[in-house]
Amino acid sequence: MLENSSKVGHSTSYSNLLGSRSALFAATDPQVPEYCELLKTDEWPVCAFLSQDCHPTNPSEEAHNTETSYQVWEKTFEMIGLPSDAVERLIEGEEVLCRYGADRG
């Protein structure tokens, strides 16, 4: 049985299984692409943000700061071991290797 959630102060803490549900929802729900298309018509260069409860949510004002967004992307790529141009290369059909891959020791 899945462990539900626990309250810590004003925040809700989810188990690993429940914590992944918003990512799975974003990858599989047919309405997410429609939501993304609506965002493209706005003046803000932001992507969809889904809360831990799997609901489209307005991003924070800081999310509208493109410099901060760029820094977050760069740090994320660094932490997961991907080159900073991974997205562009994947879109172009290239293979992108993670420096933490199974064959990398």
Image: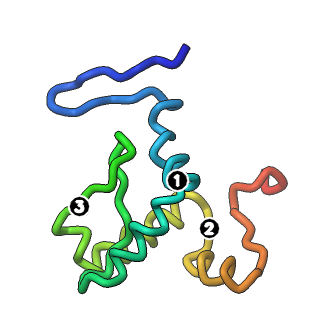
What is the distance, in whole Å, between disc 3 and disc 1 at their CAs? 18 Å
Q: In this rendering, is residue 36 above or below 13?
A: below
**Picture quarter containing residue 12?**
top left
- Mark 2 residue element: loop
Position in image of residue 40 (x %, y %)? 36, 81
Number of numbered labels in the structure image: 3
What is the distance, in whole Å, between disc 1 and disc 2 at their CAs? 26 Å
What is the distance, in whole Å, between disc 3 and disc 2 at their CAs? 28 Å
Q: Nearer the viewer, mark 3 or mark 1?
A: 1
Residues at circles 3 and 1 in contact by the CB criterion of under 8 Å: no
- Disc 1 marks a residue whose amino acid type is Asp
Task: For label 1, count other residues whose C-alpha is less than 10 Å away and answer few (under 14), some (14-19) or many (20+).
Answer: few
Query: Disc 3 or 2, which lies upstream in sequence?
Result: 3
Q: Residue furthest right?
A: 103
Q: Is residue 99 left or right of residue 49?
A: right
Q: In this rendering, is residue 42 above or below 7?
A: below
- Mark 3 residue element: loop
Residue at the (16%, 27%) spot, across then down: 9
Question: In the drawing, what numbered circle is on residue 29?
Answer: 1
Position in image of residue 85 (x %, y %)? 59, 81
Residue at the (49%, 54%) spot, across then down: 26
Q: Residue furthest top?
A: 1
What residue sits right under mark 3 in the picture?
58
Residue at the (46%, 17%) spot, across then down: 3
Task: For label 2, count other residues whose C-alpha is less than 10 Å away and answer few (under 14), some (14-19) or many (20+).
Answer: some
Colouring of the image: rainbow
- Mark 1 residue element: loop
Residue at the (25%, 69%) spot, across then down: 63
Quadrant occupied by the N terminus: top right
Q: Nearer the viewer, mark 3 or mark 2?
A: 3
Question: In the drawing, what numbered circle is on residue 82?
Answer: 2
